[in-house]
């Protein structure tokens, strides 16, 4: 696009000049930045703006929101925005280590012991998915599972607490309702950048389509090569250029509907957890009013809230009752039970106070010894009313968004800093 745009700007100017001179002067070499009258200087700054020599080749562009987090002298080259217009901004591909970072912070902040309900509160995922993830975390970080007398599983990670003992306990990561997903943008560019790209491509399309009648006669061009290189190829290219975002529009719309559903679930989780810890049931009407009041930038339908409540009820085997007037009430007893079980285990194990060489769970234990160990761990499991579980539900009065690029931003910042130090 950029090359054709520059070529056609030069050809149009040359054609205009030739037309004013009656076609007598068709030398257009200076138009491309030849010598004389300082012509090279503007071209230098043009290509500097387009290609950005400070930009490392292959470095991704995640969109204008990410661009605002960069240093002032770390400018995104224009060609990246051209590619983003057609193909969309780059999507971060975080490593498993990056994905686990916040989960490990959660485990350490909660004294090395969590339940599935704790993990779902942070990730917003389904409980079945969270149970599978807990199994992976157990294997990856040498965790152990224990069963409470009520049959609730809690998961302890003694090895993860070795970096916490004697130091400051990590701050908890944000819960799911402070980690909502913003809408996926079609191009990732600002409206101004998109306008420039559209203008350049529209000019290229118009100039190439009219070249046989405007440019060719004035500059004496013709033949198969001119038709292919200056008409056929740029016209097809420009049409495909405009078609790119139109084709992607449907996929972006589908993804944004999925994100909207996940956001409803994440906001609703905070409300459901709050009601469950208070011992109250949940109705569709008040749940819809709560979510609608928090997600003011998207349309929240009552049916969408009811669908999420049904999903949670299935995942947690909730008690569902229908009142005489026909309204449905949901009671999520598993949430306080799981959170009470993990809090009881925290108080009993005190992993953040143990010595490094203390044996918490022995792999040599027989099944009978492991069962006795679990019973001792929960010899007096505290009820939710006896525990201060409210502190695990922060900022229920507001919501927040977390961008995809935030998962990889820390490593990229370190890499850029290392590059500057090496220079």
Image (spheres, grey):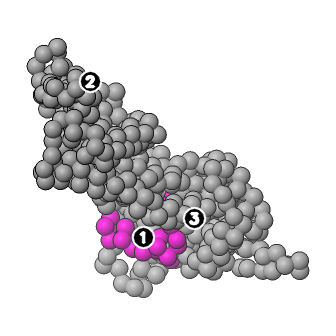
Image coordinates for residue 101, horizontal then vertical, percent: 37, 54
Instruction: Select label 3 or label 1 by which is in front.
Output: 3
> What residue is at 56 percent from the left and 80 percent from the top?
151
Return the disc, 1 or 2, that comes first in the chain's sequence: 2
Q: Which disc number belongs to residue 134?
A: 1
Who is closer to the viewer here, 203 or 132?
203
On whether residue 127 falls in the magenta region, the answer is: yes
Question: Looking at the rendering, in which quadrant would you find the N terminus?
Answer: top left
Q: Mark 2 and mark 3: span between their CA atoms?
A: 62 Å
Assign a secondary structure to mark 3.
helix
Name, please, the residue furthest toward the right.
324
Q: Does residue 180 lie above or below 317 as drawn? A: above
Span colored in magenta = 121-149
Residue displayed at 50% across by 61% down: 253
Does residue 395 appear anywhere in the picture?
A: yes
Labels 3 and 1 touching (C-beta < 8 A): no
Q: Is residue 385 visible?
A: no
Q: Residue at x 13, y 50 (%)?
A: 223
Q: Which residue is mark 2?
A: 20
Quadrant, the C terminus: top left
* Front in this rendered view, residue 294 or 237: 237
User: Does 402 lie within the magenta span?
Assistant: no
- Say if 140 sits above or below 179 in the image: below
């Amino acid at each position: 696009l950029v090359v054709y745009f520059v070529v056609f700007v030069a050809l149009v100017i040359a054609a205009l000049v030739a037309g004013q001179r009656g076609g007598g002067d068709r030398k257009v070499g200076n138009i491309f930045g030849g010598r004389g009258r300082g012509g090279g200087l503007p071209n230098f700054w043009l290509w500097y703006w387009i290609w950005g020599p400070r930009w490392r080749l292959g470095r991704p562009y995640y969109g204008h929101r990410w661009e605002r987090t960069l240093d002032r002298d770390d400018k995104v080259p224009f060609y990246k925005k051209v590619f983003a217009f057609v193909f969309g901004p780059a999507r971060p591909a975080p490593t498993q280590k990056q994905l686990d970072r916040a989960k490990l912070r959660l485990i350490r902040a909660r004294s090395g012991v969590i339940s599935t309900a704790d993990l779902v509160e942070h990730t917003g995922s389904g409980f079945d998915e969270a149970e599978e993830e807990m199994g992976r975390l157990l294997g990856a970080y040498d965790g152990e599972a224990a069963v409470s007398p009520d049959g609730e599983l809690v998961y302890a990670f003694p090895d993860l607490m070795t970096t916490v003992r004697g130091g400051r306990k990590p701050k908890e990561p944000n819960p799911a309702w402070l980690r909502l997903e913003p809408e996926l943008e079609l191009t990732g560019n600002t409206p101004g950048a998109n306008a420039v790209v559209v203008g350049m491509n529209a000019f290229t399309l118009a100039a190439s389509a009219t070249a046989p009648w405007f440019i060719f006669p004035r500059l004496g061009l013709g033949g198969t090569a001119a038709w292919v290189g200056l008409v056929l190829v740029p016209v097809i290219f420009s049409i495909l250029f405009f078609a790119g975002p139109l084709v992607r529009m449907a996929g972006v719309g589908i993804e944004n509907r999925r994100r909207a559903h996940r956001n409803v679930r994440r906001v609703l989780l905070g409300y459901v957890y709050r009601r469950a810890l208070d011992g109250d049931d949940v109705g569709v009407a008040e749940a819809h009013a709560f979510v609608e009041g928090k997600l003011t930038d998207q349309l929240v339908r009552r049916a969408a809230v009811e669908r999420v409540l049904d999903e949670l009820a299935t995942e947690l085997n909730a008690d569902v009752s229908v009142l005489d007037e026909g309204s449905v009430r949901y009671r999520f007893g598993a949430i306080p039970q799981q959170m009470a079980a993990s809090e009881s285990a925290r108080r009993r194990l005190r992993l953040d106070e143990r010595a490094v060489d203390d044996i918490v769970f022995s792999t040599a234990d027989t099944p009978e010894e492991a069962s006795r160990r679990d019973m001792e761990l929960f010899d007096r499991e505290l009820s939710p009313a006896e525990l201060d579980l409210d502190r695990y539900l922060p900022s229920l009065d507001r919501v927040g968004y977390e961008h995809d690029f935030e998962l990889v931003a820390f490593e990229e910042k370190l890499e850029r800093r290392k590059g500057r130090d090496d220079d």
